[in-house]
Amino acid sequence: MELNPEKYQRQKSFLDGLRENTVSGQVVKSREDIQKGRSHLTPQGYIQSYPDNNDGSKQQ
């Protein structure tokens, strides 16, 4: 991401377009918005469904 920021921006805008212009993308975005900031129980303990940070990192 740091080495090629133009490629990252193109990919990000493409994914944003998919989320806005396709039914499945809209469903995924809606689900993320509903669950954002909430946590749920897994065998490993409580985790957040979608972290509030929007830097693309995944919580494991």
Image (cartoon, rainbow, N blue to C red):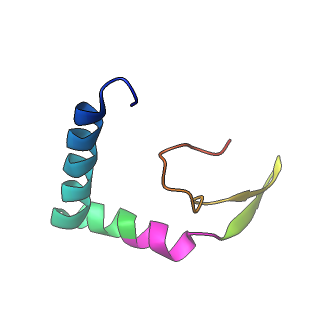
Task: Please tell me how many numbered marks the rendered image carries.
Answer: 0
Q: Position of residue 2 (x, y in %)?
A: 40, 29
Is-magenta flag for residue 49? no
Quadrant where the N terminus sits is top left
- Left/right placement of residue 15 relative to residue 1 reads left
Residue 25 drawn at (x, y percent): 28, 61
Q: Quadrant of residue 27?
A: bottom left
Residue lying farthest to the bottom in this orientation: 34
> Against 60, is 26 above or below?
below
Against 52, residue 3 (above or below) is above
In the rendered image, residue 32 lying in the magenta stretch gets the answer yes
The residue under the point 18% across, 57% down is 17
Q: Residue 48 location, x and y as percent?
A: 67, 60
The main secondary structure of the magenta stretch is helix
User: In the displayed structure, does residue 49 sit left or right of residue 44?
Assistant: left
Position of 41 relative to 3 (above/below): below
- Between residue 26 and residue 5, name the one nearer to us: 5
Return the residue nearer the eye: 53 or 17. Answer: 53
Residue lying at 56% horizontally and 57% vertically, measured from the top left: 53
Q: Which residue sits furthest left?
A: 21
46 or 43, which is in the foreground?
46
Q: Which quadrant, please, contains the C terminus? A: top right
What residue appears at the point 63 percent right and 69 percent down from the top-left corner?
A: 37
Could you say where residue 5 lies in the image, as x and y percent from the top left? 30, 34
Question: What is the span of residues highlighted in magenta in the rendered image?
Answer: 30-37
